[in-house]
Each structure stands twice: as structure tokens, then as C-alpha cells.
């Protein structure tokens, strides 16, 4: 499968400057799930900027 990194970057809201997975969604998701987190794209922009990617932060961000 061909990576669509250039297309993905147009929609990626990750604000972490050193992210090596930016735009590489399959690697990003795998990395975050391994750490029991969710990637930036699961969060609204204001919550994403806190870098708290925990499941609890996700629930708080979406009032779940």
C-alpha cells in the first residue's frame, strides 16, 4: 500500500514539532495505541495542544 503522507499532512493537527510520524497515520496510530494513547487527530485542537493523549483526556475533550 502506498503511503499518502502529503495528503495526510493537510489534515494532520499534530502540533508536536518533533513528531517523526506526522502524516504517516498507520505508524502514528500504532505508536500511540502501544502507549495506551490516541493520536492528535482524535482531539479537538485546543485539547490536542496539551499533548495529553490519554483515553481520559479524550473523554474529557468530548464530554463523554
Image (cartoon, helix red, strand yellow):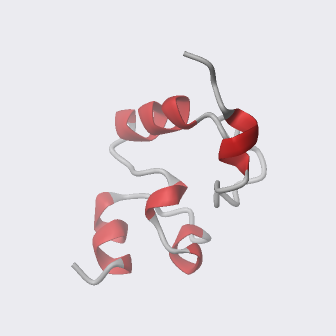
Residue drawn 38% across and 78% down? 61
Q: How many numbered marks does the figure carry?
A: 0
Tell me where residue 18 appears, x and y as whole percent: 76, 44
Tell me where residue 54 appears, x and y as whole percent: 37, 58
For this orientation, the residue located farthest to the bottom is 63
Residue drawn 28% across and 72% down? 59
Q: Along the line of sight, which residue is nearer the eye, 43 or 34?
A: 43
Asked if 3 appears above or below 56 in the picture, the reply is above
For this orientation, the residue located farthest to the left is 64
Describe residue 54's horizontal placement relative to residue 44 as left or right: left
Tell me where residue 38 appears, x and y as whole percent: 40, 51
Quarter that holds the N terminus: top right
Quarter that holds the C terminus: bottom left
For this orientation, the residue located farthest to the top is 1
Query: Quadrant of the rendered structure where residue 48 is?
Result: bottom right
Query: Quadrant of the rendered structure where residue 5 is?
Result: top right
Describe residue 5's horizontal placement relative to residue 59 as left or right: right
Residue drawn 43% across and 31% down? 30
Residue drawn 70% across and 60% down? 15
Q: Decide if residue 10 is in sight here.
A: yes
Describe residue 42's horizontal placement relative to residue 9 as left or right: left
Asked if 35 appears above or below 42 in the picture, the reply is above
Tell me where residue 28 appears, x and y as whole percent: 53, 37
Q: Decide if residue 20 is in sight here.
A: no
Amino acid at each position: 500500500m502506498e503511503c499518502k503522507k502529503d495528503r495526510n499532512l493537510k489534515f494532520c493537527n499534530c502540533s508536536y514539532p518533533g513528531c517523526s510520524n506526522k502524516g504517516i497515520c498507520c505508524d502514528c496510530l500504532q505508536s500511540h495505541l502501544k502507549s495506551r494513547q490516541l493520536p492528535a487527530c482524535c482531539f479537538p485542537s485546543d485539547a490536542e495542544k496539551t499533548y495529553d493523549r490519554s483515553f481520559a483526556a479524550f473523554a474529557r475533550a468530548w464530554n463523554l
